[in-house]
Image: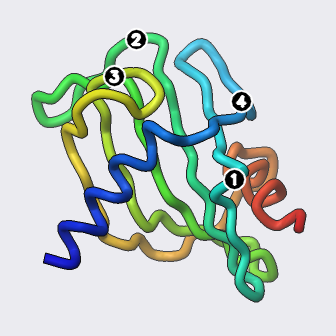
Amino acid sequence: MKFILIVLALISSSANADWSYINGDANGSQYIDHDKTKKTGSVAKIWTAVDYNQPRQVMGKVFNSVVAQEEYDCNKEIRRTVFVALYEGRMGNGRALMIDSAITAWTPTPPGSSGEMLLNIACEN
């Protein structure tokens, strides 16, 4: 029951996010919610959103945006995904079509990547 309440809180938080544009290309735009950025020790947690210009499809589900919570280790310059949800609507709105709360393995953030940009934003405090 507690897990369900946490997931529902995470889902509803995307609609209430204060997204700030950070970059984009022909495929879509990436955003961060600065208000929900938290840093404990050397690890920073951030919420990001990707809003696609054209609908995407995975496993037969058509989605227009992805919202994720990621962790960045500021000292080791590595990252992992803690939560990800695919949304029917733009900017994390509409019905959540797929939710994954499996924590991924830590991976390096390649120089010049959007991951490096997010690392710098998350760890600047």
Q: Secondary structure at mark 4?
A: strand
Q: Residue at x 68, y 52 (%)?
A: 115
Q: CA distance from mark 4 to mark 1?
A: 13 Å
Give the Cα distance between marks 2 and 3: 11 Å
- Which residue lies under the disc numbered 4? 21
Crowdedness of circle 4 by 10 Å Cα count: few (<14), some, many (20+)? some
Q: Quickly name the residue at label 3.
A: 89
Looking at the rendered image, the disc whose residue lies closer to the viewer, 4 or 1, is: 1
Helix, strand or loop for disc 2? strand
Q: Disc 1 or 3, which lies upstream in sequence?
A: 1
The crowding category of the residue bearing disc 3, from other C-alpha atoms within 10 Å (few below 14, some 14 to 19, many at least 20), is some
Which residue was labeled with disc 2? 54
Foreground: disc 1 or disc 3 = 1
Q: Which residue is mark 1?
A: 35
Q: Position of residue 99 (x, y in %)?
A: 25, 52
Nearer the observer, 112 or 71: 71
